[in-house]
Image (cartoon, rainbow, N blue to C red):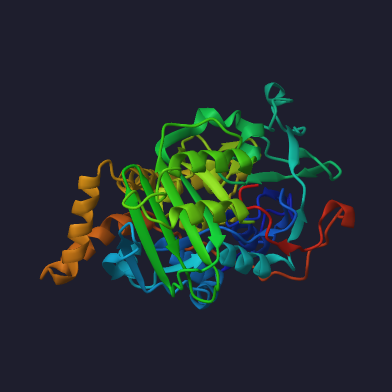
Amino acid sequence: MSGTVSPSSRTSPRTVLISGASIAGPALAHWLHRYGFAVTVVERAPGLRTGGYKVDIRGAAVEVAERMGILADIQRASTDMRTGAYVNDDGKRIATLPAALFGARVGRDDEIMRGDLARILYERTRADVEYVFGDSITSLTGRADEHEHEHDRGHGHGHGSDGTGGVEVTFERGAPRRFDLVVGADGVHSNVRRLAFGPEEQFVRHLGAYISAFSLPNALGLDREELYHAVPGRLSCVYSSAGDPAAKGLLTFRSPRLAYDHRQPAQQLALLDAAFKDVGVRPSEGWTQIPRLLEAARAADDFYFDGLQLIEMDRWSRGRVVLLGDAAHCPSPASGQGTGMALVGAYVLAGELAVAGRGPEEAFERYEKEMRGYVAVNHALAEKFAKDMTADTRRQIRFRHLMMRILPYMPWQNLIAKKIAEEVQRGANAITLKDHPAPAAATGHLPAAGCAPATGCAPATGSPTYAA
């Protein structure tokens, strides 16, 4: 990459509000700051959310991480998983394979805990980006300017605004502020998407299953190993990663779409209990660890529960408001690509904003054009993998176990492993990254304008409930 670029002089420094401090938001903040934007990140949680399960960094996302300068950090924090195994009801390993085969990783692909990646991104940006924890957006109102057509005035989000128009933002706790751009990087249940585009229900496509993740004591003594157990319609997993004395539990079950409040863990725990209530309670009726997993889920401070679902939208922007990551195109955990897509999307959006000649609307259009094919491929993979995660019958489960048991002894095992990885790699590399002009060197730290201690602007860390 060559040359430098900075935001247009007519609006420099442009102000951007990002909702969401998980992965997509801080990644975008990193790039926007380097391009000269003044960035504020608002996060509903009272501190950095460090929970979550392990996530993959593959293909184009590896290249983005390298360009960000965080690839070495990711490698140091790697889960370093060694093996994956299926177990029977008594916990005996009946089929063991290398972890890389389980994760379909090749080359420089890596795996990291979501919380570790969030911490890396936060530490890289906290000195140059205003973080406001413990607050949330309550309204977005487009502000027209004197250059807009009369019929665009007052239509909600500054449609067509190309001058000084921006977005008036109100918050639950903080004072109202105006920003040139607002980005919703606040996940599958995006608040910004609801305010700017309407109710979540119109954009969700349920893939027929639910997933839960949580921490628990490593009573099985696992060392960078993951154990899986399957019964018809349900899949459970326990694993440990490098450097973490605790273990993680994963429970997945097939179900039509369920009605519950995604901010009420008690409702989610009840659904989880109902789905697994008979598993492992009596001999030969499932893994005897399941009751312990359900108990651990109730005790965990990082409990997570959600549906395997896609977010599908005709457009990701409206006026000066744009969506990023899961808020725009969640591929569900079944794809294994959500984190990578968040990193890639942040790179693409920031680069297009930095070089847009006729305002942010042009940048948003180019961003969508670059990302749409990439998203479509990974949505298709998610649909396939969601069906594969759970088996319908015990006969199917036994056949799967048999195939895994004999795979290491097959002369064509490498070809099979390659075939398994090809589908995932196709999704991970379904975009060609542009070489955007190199960002101008950032100078100094941005002031936390309008930030008082009572608003929660001070850097904070902690482990609040991941599902909150």
**Which residue corresponds to the image point at 61% horizontal and 61% vertical from the top-left?**
31
Give the camera-side residue of 231 and 264. Answer: 231
Query: 292 or 224: nearer the eye?
Result: 292
Residue positioned most to the top: 151
Could you tell me residue 463's position as x and y percent?
68, 60
Question: Residue 406: percent from the left, percent from the top?
Answer: 16, 65
**Above or below: residue 363 compared with residue 112:** above
Residue 159 visible in this rendered orientation of the protein: no
Q: Is residue 445 above or below residue 431?
A: below
**Picture quarter containing residue 111?**
bottom left
Side of 121 relative to 61 (left or right): right
Residue displayed at 44% across by 61% down = 238
User: Percent from the top left, x then y, of residue 280?
Assistant: 40, 51
Percent x, y of residue 249: 48, 58
Q: Is residue 419 in view from this perspective?
A: yes
Q: Residue at x 53, y 49 (%)?
A: 325
